[in-house]
Image: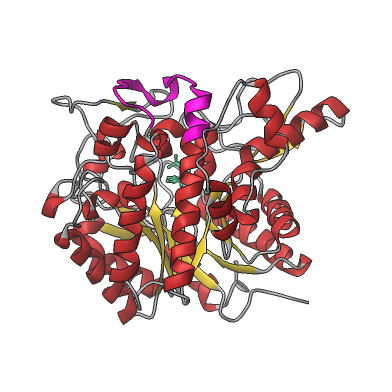
Amino acid sequence: MKTFKPDFLWGGATAANQYEGAWDVDGKGASVSDHCTNGSHTSPKRVTPVFEEGTLYPSRVATNFYHHYKEDIALAAEMGFKVFRMSINWTRIYPTGMEETPNEKGLEFYDKVFDELKKYNIEPLVTISHYEIPYGLVETYNGWYSRETIDCFVRYCKTIFERYKGKVKYWLTFNEINSGTMPMGAVLSLGTIKGYNGPVNKVPDEKEVRYQALHHQFVASAMVIKYAHENYPEYKLGNMSILATSYPLTCNPADVVENQKNARMMNWFCSDVQARGYYPSYMDRFFEENNITIKKEPGDDEILKQGTIDFYTFSYYMSSCISAENKDSGAGNLIAGVPNPYLKASDWGWQIDPEGLRYTLNEVWDRYQLPVMVVENGLGAYDKLEDGTVHDSYRIDYLRQHIAQMEEAVKDGVDLMGYTPWGWIDVVSASTGEYAKRYGFVYVNRDDNDQGDFSRIRKDSFFWYKKVIESNGKDLD
Ligand code: BG6
């Protein structure tokens, strides 16, 4: 019976906007996330074009990887990481996104990070754009809505591809690209919020703008994949989608059809384009019914075909149910759907579904036949410091069950490359902008009142995950 490969990539995931901090140090510019305030499960974070005095903008300090990278990489190495998923802050390299020449100090920072990883034989897995489009591009171009943003992104990619040759092999173009199908994706990923001042969950639902912006992301992603394949044959490039797996609420055929529709729109549309190289035919009806016309330039369809991905990656946290009758969202703060009566939810209402991960991995494999990697998964929880540590048995339980289901998927025949649980060290939450929602094996002493010295503390899960890696996934106790 198959099991995890001997060279399985065990590790953890982070993103610069939630982890690095040092938002204006060494020439870095402001990104959308630097303009987002702190929030919580009950009070949404806001985006403000102008910084407000006395308001907390957590991304600006985050958990300070910028000044702790050596210590953090040593902790990752202590757990036995084989891979380290991180992202490059676009605004560290091109502060407004529009400069002609890159910021050398920003480039140097990632040189140091990659060299440090190399010291421990840890492979970087780099997300090129993870929820931190330069705010300059928002103000000038309304983010990805304008085609000009493609050129800015391509310039940025060419710079980092060349600079980090021999240091990085695995790249993901856009984090959770399919978040752009949802209104909140306008803030997180597309930057189509020029002039918007308000809560992130109240951004106007401008479908045509979002799908046009997504088209530009598809083209940009394909262009840089094609370019990398031609110039750096050793590079492997992947997509990254949120897989918000959903089930029909009942066996009523109306629920089944509604669920299929939802899964196509939410989960498959973007990766169908990125993996197959063309728009799926089911989108024609959606565009027609919603009066959406995508402006394409001659050559776009060709580029999409030429720049398909080498491997498929996704985040998986939860699942939900879809009902034809009741479309109210009650299954999580980002994802549509209604609660599943068979599942329990986290404190943030995200329904915990380990078997759903096995199901999802099989769906991806059957659909694309590409090597797959789970690049985010984990439990956001309120942690309590006790006896100088965190006894996070709830997190261990969550991860244990998901890893066991990943192994089932491997037995089912899925070509699984690796696993990088989210926020292996505490970071700021993307959806709520708070510190209180923690995922890490390592606790970072920082809170929502702007207090804490950023010291790092190993939680119980740290020692558990170390054993998991040592045993290549055999010892889950
Ligand atoms: C994914 C993102 O949506 O999930 C991460 O890629 C994010 O950036 C993670 O942090 C967990 O979500 P949250 O909202 O709990 O931070």
Residue 456 appears left or right of 50: right
Tell me the quadrant of the picture where the C terminus can be found. bottom right
Whether residue 253 is visible, yes or no, is: yes
The answer to which of 383 and 349 lies nearer the viewer is 349
Tell me the quadrant of the picture where the N terminus can be found. bottom right
Residue 283, how many percent across, how many down?
67, 35
Which stretch did the figure color magenta? 192-212
**Quadrant holding ligand 1?**
top left
Q: How many marks?
A: 0
Kindly identify the residue that appears in the image at 13 percent across and 25 percent down: 53
Residue 320, how many percent across, how many down?
66, 35
The answer to which of 52 and 98 lies nearer the viewer is 98
Kindly identify the residue that appears in the image at 43 percent across and 29 percent down: 41
Residue 109, how many percent across, how many down?
21, 64
The answer to which of 80 and 209 lies nearer the viewer is 209
Q: Which quadrant holds residue 245? A: top right
- Image coloring type: secondary structure
Whether residue 461 is visible, yes or no, is: no
Residue 281 appears left or right of 378: right
Residue 204 appears left or right of 321: left
Residue 367 appears left or right of 375: right
Residue 120, how many percent across, how many down?
34, 80
**Does 174 lie within the magenta span?**
no
Kindly identify the residue that appears in the image at 31 percent across and 48 percent down: 152
Vertical placement of residue 300 versus 239, above or below? above
Vertical placement of residue 175 versus 470, above or below? above
**Does 207 lie within the magenta span?**
yes
Vertical placement of residue 314 versus 235, above or below? above
